[in-house]
Image (spheres, rainbow, N blue to C red):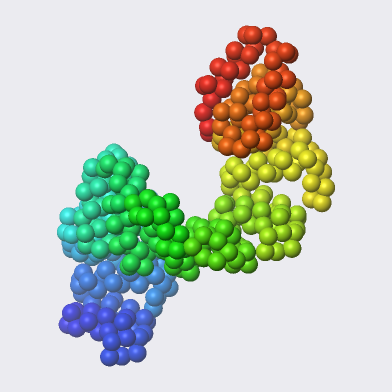
Amino acid sequence: MALAQFSLGVMYANGRGVPQDYAQAAMWYRRAADQGDDEAQGHLGAMYAKGQGVPQDYAQAVNWYRKAADQGNADAQANLGWMYAKGVGTPQDYAQALNWTRKAADQGNADAQANLGWMYAKGVGTPQDYAQALNWTRKAADQGNADAQVNLGMAYINGDGVERDSAEAAKWLRKAADGGSPIAQQKLGQLYENGQGVPQDYMQAASWYGRAARQGNPDAQTSLGWMYAEGHGVPQDLAQALAWFRKGADQGNALAQYNLGEMYAKGLGVPRNFAQAFSWFGKAADQGNAVAQATLGWWYAAGQEEVVSQDFAQASSWFRKAADQGNAFAQANLGVLYAEGYGVPQDYTQALMWSTLAITRAEDDATRELAAKVRDALAGKMTPSQIAGAQRMAREWFPK
């Protein structure tokens, strides 16, 4: 009887031979679940988790998953482990998450194997162990689990538990990308853009970025916008660049927000609008984007009159945030502010330290020349011991 009820639930859930009806599916699953059928209990848990045919109720989902898991149902064990790991429907408990995830993984459940690999890689509920992470991730990847294939590809890119191997990374990312994973498609686009593990090919990069971008991946949307802005792999099209940057920016991608600000500031593909530019720079800066922070610092230092008045205190604050991350332009300008006492107490040691860092890190001549000018001007104003102290501070500095 329970088997027939469960089977009828499956038919209603999938619309096989009857109109799809989640409420009917849930009803038949419950009848079978109340008789102890573990498959029905697991499926009923999933319906509560998704709110299909019943009100969404994570506590009920956990309850039914546990009933099925206690009977050895691997899918329910994997789902219960995930609920404990995320603290959904139950207090977060990594020990319980590890316990149930391992039970399911030992039965060959690919989702559990992928999750177990992730837990070992991140040290969640267990000491970090890249060898174990690689072992479980590979098991899941070999079964076609897209998340595991992505994680395995990233392990080869980052050298986590394996030698760095961009070609092997590309192989696993392609498997997941071909299966439709937007994260894999975005990462594969990066490999083609940079020629890592595959021949550099901007058209392939744009193609993979496009697939992921159309699925809503904000990183891919940002990268595709850049490809259109530069004409890499696609015809240069500032309107398309603007559209894709906006999609990424609206999802909170800091780089897209900065790029959108640049387009408004320069009038690229859109009428110049400094207020809009300032707004998008601010959003990116608040997320820690160093280039956006340095840009805001410059606007405050120069006094972008259409948007902000000159304010050296604000300038020094934003320059410091970017400088602490290693942005050479911000470091050079922070050196100027300390040398002159603009927005900060005049401090020649700080000025020389930041100028020295900017000289060694700058990628453009203008920044390097500005920092060198400050350094040279300070030479006659500081004692040898002060200069040595500033140089020592620069050597000991590291980005935050």
Residue pictured at 23% horizontal, 53% vertical:
138
Position of residue 35 measured from the top left corner of the image (x, y, whole percent): 20, 74
Q: In the rendered view, tell whether residue 241 sits above or below residue 393.
A: below
Q: In the rendered view, tell whether residue 237 sits above or below residue 328.
A: below
Residue pictured at 40% horizontal, 52% vertical:
195
Q: How many marks?
A: 0
Q: Nearer the viewer, residue 172 or 367?
A: 367
Q: Nearer the viewer, residue 118 or 237?
A: 237
Q: In the rendered view, tell whether residue 328 sits above or below residue 173.
A: above
Q: Is residue 51 visible?
A: yes
Residue pictured at 81% horizontal, 40% vertical:
310
Position of residue 125 measured from the top left corner of the image (x, y, whole percent): 31, 44
Q: Quadrant of the N terminus?
A: bottom left
Q: In the rendered view, tell whether residue 72 sits above or below residue 48.
A: above
Q: Is residue 67 visible?
A: no
Position of residue 36 measured from the top left corner of the image (x, y, whole percent): 20, 71
The answer to whether 300 appears left or right of 209 in the picture is right
Q: Nearer the viewer, residue 20 or 291?
A: 291
**Quarter assignment of residue 13:** bottom left
The answer to whether 273 appears left or right of 61 in the picture is right
Position of residue 151 measured from the top left corner of the image (x, y, whole percent): 33, 53
